[in-house]
Image (tube, rainbow, N blue to C red):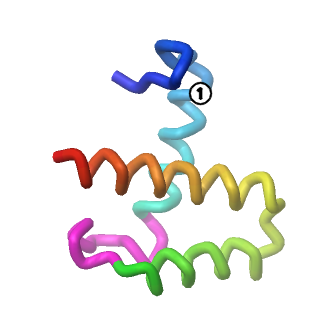
Amino acid sequence: MLHNKKGKLSQLTIDFYRIITDQILEAPQFKNRNLKAITVKDIDSYIISLKDKGVAMSTVKHHFDVLRIIFNYAEQK
């Protein structure tokens, strides 16, 4: 279950994170890759690719935040 500091996340937020996660998983930097094999260079490349596509900085930040959530979770396991 996803939670923030104030408690359970709304369904809208969960759906938004799911959309971003799906986009991340389809990106060439991450597609069919083991989480342990992903490097800082891969993440930088992904962020740069978003910026190169003209994605708004707020959206880039959301993608970065989702990546951070994924890696923080993985680190705990």
Q: Which residues are magenta?
A: 26-38
Q: Nearer the viewer, residue 55 or 66?
A: 66
The answer to whether residue 27 is magenta is: yes
Residue 77 lies, in percent from the top left, at: 16, 46
Q: Is residue 45 above or below residue 35?
A: below
Residue at 55 percent of width and 83 percent of height: 45
| Depth check, front residue: 33 or 58 | 58
Q: Is residue 48 above or below residue 12?
A: below
Which residue is at 51% across, 49% downward? 66
Task: Using the image as rendered, state which of residue 18 and residue 68 is in the foreground.
Answer: 68
Residue nearer the viewer, 4 or 35: 4
Quadrant of the rendering where the N terminus is positioned: top left
Tag 1 residue: 13
| Image coords of residue 60 (percent x, y) | 70, 61
In the rendered image, residue 21 lying in the magenta stretch gets the answer no
Residue 4 to residue 22: above or below: above
Mark 1 surroundings: few (<14), some (14-19) or many (≥20) residues within 10 A:
few
* Apparent side of residue 12 relative to residue 8 in the rendered image (left or right): right
Magenta span main SS? loop
Q: Residue at x 75, y 75 (%)?
A: 51
User: Which residue is rendered at x = 47% and y = 54% of the image?
Assistant: 68
Q: Amino acid at mark 1?
A: Thr
- Element class at badge 1: helix
